[in-house]
Structure formats: C-alpha cells, structure tokens
Amino acid sequence: MAPSQPRYSLFEPSELILSGQGVTTLYRVGAIAARSLPAPLVAALPPIAALPLSRALPHKRRIVERHMRRAMGSSATTSDIRRAARNAFASYCRYWIESFRLPSIKSALLSDGIEVPDYQYVEEALNRGKGVILALPHLGGWEWAGFWMATVNKLPITVVVEPIEPPQLFEWFAGFRSQLGMKVVPIGPTAGAEIASALKRNEIVCLLCDRDISGSGIEVDFMGERTTLPGGPALLALRTGAAVLPTAVYFQPRGQHLGVVRPPLDTIRQATVKEDVVRVTGQLAAELALLIRRAPEQWHLFQPNWPSDSSFQS
C-alpha cells in the first residue's frame, strides 16, 4: 500500500524554495495567523488570494482546469472552466484557514455551522455494529464535519491520510488532527490492519477515495474517462461487513457547511472477491462523480488523476 507519490499538498517544498523545516514553520505560522484573524477577514481572504495563487502555480492551475472540464461537462465554456478553477484555489484557501481555526471553535458553534440532512445513514450503519467507511472526495470542508462528529457526537474517528513531504510537516499535521479528536493513520504497510481493527470496534473510518496514489487501484469509468481508483474501501467492506457511505461536506455561505451522506453501497457478496471489488469500486466512482459535480469549484485536487494527464506533470 505504499504510495508512489507520497504527498498531497498544494505547495511543494521545491515550489516554495524552502527546507522541510521551513515549510513546516510556514504552516505553523499560518495556523497561528488564521486563529487570530477577525471573522470578516477570514471570509474575505480566500477569494482575494485565489487569483495570485493560481497565477503563481500555473502547472497546478492547468491540472485543475482539466479536472473542472471533466466535472462540468462539454457545455462549460472556457471562461466557466477558468472561473471554476480559480474558485477551487479559493475553496482550498478556505479549507486551510478554517481547519487551522477549528481547535478554537466551541461545540455550540460547530453544531450551528453544519447541517447533515441524511445523517441517519451514519446512525443506521453504526447500529449494525460493523463499522462505517465514509468515502470522500478531496472536496469542501470535511474537517469541520470530522471535528463535529468527534467532539460533539463523541464518535471515534480514524482518518487515513497520505504521508505528505517533508516528514516534519506530516508529523505536524498528524498532531494537529489528533487535537481535533481524530486518529491519524498514514497510508503504508500497517494501514489495512489498523483500519480493519477500527471497523471491528464499530468506529468510523474516513477514506479520501478520488485519487489512486498507489497506482495499483481498480480501473473504472470516472467522469467519462478511464482511470483507477483505490480498491481499499470495497475490499475492506467486503471483508468486514462495514457500510460504505459516499460522503461530501460542502462549503456554504456565511461560514456554514452542508454534509451530504449518500445511501450505503451494495456490498453484498455476488461473485469472487476480485469481481466484487471491481463492481463496488465502480459504484463508488459513480457516487464520487455525483458528489463532485454538485460543486466542482470546491474540488481540491491539484494532481494528475487520469492517464491522459501525464503530459501535464512537468
């Protein structure tokens, strides 16, 4: 399970011309600054930062524009695509500013700031006693929902994350998420066993599933083009009986959030394990596409994700 591209960050050290410690310090300072900002400035900053940020990172902007075109379809104009890509940078800025501020937000404000109309799917899955896999795209403000579930609802949450570079930055992020009440499991040789143990304890496991970082996933049709997505969610569900709930948390105006939880995937055994993993992963791809297309400008995927993106990697 070791990833071939072990990082997920908008800013790479080479782009910032900083050492690993320097990048970590930059994020630490950013966290402190975000917590000290007045609320009106917090709301105004992401769209202001989006344009210079997208211009400073032209390679990532081109990749995001390709993803926006897939999500928005052939009817979207070039202007539509560029606007959505710029808004994706703004959404990503909001994600980080908001995440940095989460530890200082009181429980009442957490609850007031999110609506999850179909939360009953989570409750029903937990009542089955076999654990819950929340399968998410890199979209919107899912950390808010995770903090809300961990602190307000008192639910144990395990978050499986990519071991970003540099290592000091990953350690800082892991500690930061632990402060939010989440257990962090880096993708690696022991991840599968740790996830299975969490599910056996009837806990919630959050898996970001719209990118196959190992390069050994399941081939699916994803937004009209063939690529691979991780088969782990399907395999875990088939082996443990855990429910797989496609989920997304969308940014809303005035600091609000909307959590969308879809019905559980059909993980009843029908054929061989391999065939069932392919079938369930195909279902997941369709659900992720549906969730992303609801608000493509909130999709924070800045890396190549389809084979045809390979020419844009340099």
Image (tube, rainbow, N blue to C red):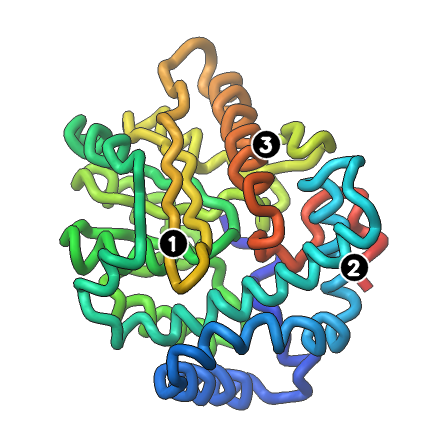
Residue, x 62% and y 59% (percent of image)? 88
Q: CA distance from mark 1 to mark 2?
A: 28 Å
Point out the frontmost of discs 1 and 2: 1
Q: Residue pushed farthest top? A: 270
Quarter-of-image position of residue 130: top left
How much space separates mark 3 and mark 2, taking CA atoms? 26 Å
Task: State yes or no: discs 3 and 2 in contact (Cβ < 8 Å).
Answer: no
Pick whichever of labels 3 and 2 is earlier in the sequence.
2
Q: Which mark is on residue 218? A: 3
Please give the label number shown on residue 62: 2
In space, the residues marked 1 and 3 are separated at their CA atoms by 31 Å
The image position of residue 34, as x and y in percent, is: 41, 82
Mark 2 belongs to which amino acid?
Answer: Arg
Query: Residue 68, image x and y in percent?
Result: 70, 48
Q: In front: 224, or 22?
A: 224
Mark earlier in primary sequence (1, 3)? 3
| Front-lying residue, 45 or 101 | 45
Q: Which residue is mark 1?
A: 257
Position of residue 150 in the picture relative to residue 294 (left or right): left
- Name the N-terminal-most of marks 1 and 2: 2
**Closer to the camera: disc 1 or disc 3?**
1
- The amino acid type of the residue labelled 3 equals Ile
Could you tell whether 93 is left or right of 194 in the image?
A: right
Q: Amino acid at mark 1?
A: His
Under circle 2, the secondary element is helix
